[in-house]
Image (cartoon, grey):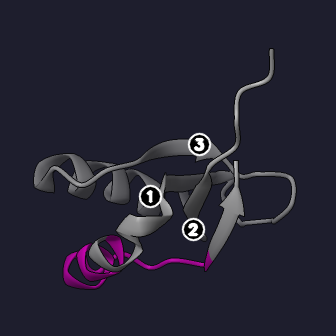
Amino acid sequence: MAREKAEKVVFTFHTTTMAMKMERSAKESGSPGRLIPVPRQISAGCGMAWSAPAGDRETLETLIREAGIETEGTYNLFL
């Protein structure tokens, strides 16, 4: 039985350092999401991305801005 796909916001990064900084910042702030391999529908420099429920996009964009995290792209995907 296939699981149902849900809409996610996916942030990609130029470097693994920024992906790891995102993971650390999200954990410290209690923000949702997790690191995933970059989905094949998109491409990114480091091969890692942050995935979270689409409804948390604004919260995560604020976290990214305040933490000084450099992203490569932001996507809404069904994963």
Asked whether the residues under the numbered discs 3 and 2 touch, taking CB atoms below 8 Å apart as contact, a structural biologist would say no
Gap in angstroms between the C-alphas marked 3 and 1:
14 Å
Question: Which sits in the foreground, 29 or 79?
Answer: 79
Q: Which residue lies furthest to the top in this view?
A: 1
* Image quarter (top left, top right, bottom left or bottom right) of the N terminus: top right
Q: Earlier in the sequence, mark 3 or mark 1?
A: 1
- Residues shaded magenta: 60-74
Q: What residue is rendered at 62% in x and 49% in y?
A: 6
> Which of the numbered marks, if any, corresponds to residue 13?
2
> Which of the numbered marks, if any, corresponds to residue 1?
none
Q: What residue is rendered at 81% in x and 65% in y?
A: 42
Which residue is under mark 3? 36
Which residue is under mark 1? 17
Disc 1 element:
helix
Asked whether the residues under the numbered discs 1 and 2 touch, taking CB atoms below 8 Å apart as contact, a structural biologist would say no
Question: Which sits in the foreground, 49 or 3?
Answer: 3
Gap in angstroms between the C-alphas marked 3 and 2:
12 Å
Gap in angstroms between the C-alphas marked 1 and 2:
9 Å
Rendered location of residue 71, percent (x, y): 51, 77
Disc 2 element:
loop
